[in-house]
Amino acid sequence: MNYAIAIDIGGTNTRVALVNEDYVIEERVQFPTDPRNPYNTIEEIRKAIEGFGKQAKGIGISCPGPLDLIHGYILTTTNLEKEWYNYPICEKLSEATSLPVYLENDANLACLAEACIGRGKDYHYVSFMTVSTGVGSGLVINKQIYQGAHGFAHEIANIPLWKDGPSHGSIYPGGVEAISSGTAITTRAKNAGLDVGHAGDVNDLAVKGDETAAQIIDDAKEYLANAIAIIYAFLDPDIVILGGSVALKIPGFVEDVEMRVKSKVFSTIAPLVNVVKTNLNEDSGLLGGACLVFLLSVDIDITGHYDCLRLFSGRGIALLYQNHIQSFFHIHLLLL
């Protein structure tokens, strides 16, 4: 049985899982992401992998973007501090674990899992959106991640939708993440004087008739529906799959958003709008990481000493990093 290590580094928690080739998660560990010290998070990941006691083919890691997929760096991320900016996550994690590391945007990996083994498996054009600590999106066309010209496709968090709207970290004021993410919902509620701990609390108050909470939840749904309507206008996907804690845990959230999207597109498109909740629950990013490992891991026997080999072809770019402990090569392939 072949195994992959799948890691999801989120703004709140980091999850590490052992996934077999049948895409069954056999073991998992979760711990808080250290927002100020990447080393601490890397060390906790190393301990988790060591505890699994299985030899894996590699590590598929999902992180919130934007990312430098060519060099394996986290560029910036709204929900982590500046110590994570321009951080060489692939290099550091490979050094700590002696395994090849494959990096992708968290929403792209979740979308890949949905397209291969989730609710998008019977479709050619699959869009995925995660609505959780942040808001992210991915697009898979014919089982391949669409990354755009520079690897930044579907970085929708910063889409400006509300002039002079709410602020949230480095997100443009009025960006969809600043309105519809769980963090934004909670922050807006707290700023309005409500006693809440997370987005679910805000929704509970809204259901009980609190007008301020109801407006915040309505804004989250309305502007998310606007973003999805834009995706339909530009990309015409077969299906849009929603995941993340806000979409999964707030009753009726996805159904309400779908109804709003249908009201915002051309009448000829409305019957084709298909916005659904993921059936992979919160594991889509982890399963996508495993998909990446099994798709891209290759055994190579190369003599000689190289720090980094770059292979260019019409299909993409492959980076090979030699691990000086076990003399393997890390391959990162960008399909264009």
Image: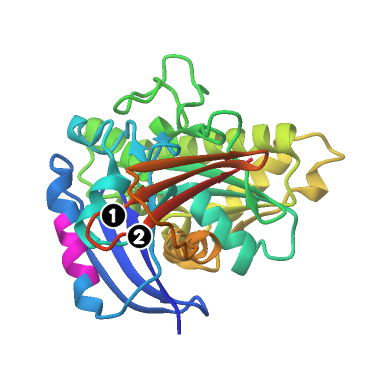
* Nearer to the camera, 46 or 192: 46
Q: Relative to residue 92, is residue 7 drawn left or right?
A: right
The coloring applied to the image is: rainbow
Mark 2 residue type: Phe
CB under 8 Å between callouts 1 and 2?
A: yes
Which numbered disc covers residue 150?
none
Mark 1 residue type: Asn
User: x%, y% of residue 200?
Assistant: 34, 54
**Residue at 75% across, 55% down:** 124
Q: Relative to residue 50, is residue 256 drawn left or right?
A: right
Query: Vertical placement of 36 versus 255: above or below?
Result: above
* Nearer to the camera, 4 or 323: 323
Query: Vertical placement of 326 versus 263: above or below?
Result: below
User: x%, y% of residue 140?
Assistant: 64, 49
* Nearer to the camera, 181 or 73: 73
Q: Relative to residue 160, is residue 39 drawn left or right?
A: left
Image quadrant where one finds the C terminus: top right
Q: Magenta span has 287? A: no
- Residue highlighted by disc 2: 328
User: x%, y% of residue 317?
Assistant: 54, 40
Range of the magenta residues? 43-49
Q: CA distance from mark 1 to mark 2?
A: 5 Å
Q: Residue furthest top?
A: 164
**Residue at 60% across, 29% down:** 149
- Label 2 crowd (10 A; few <14 / some 14-19 / many >=20): some
Q: Secondary structure at mark 2?
A: loop
**Quick check: can you spot residue 213?**
no
Query: Vertical placement of 301 versus 19: above or below?
Result: above
Which numbered disc covers residue 323?
1
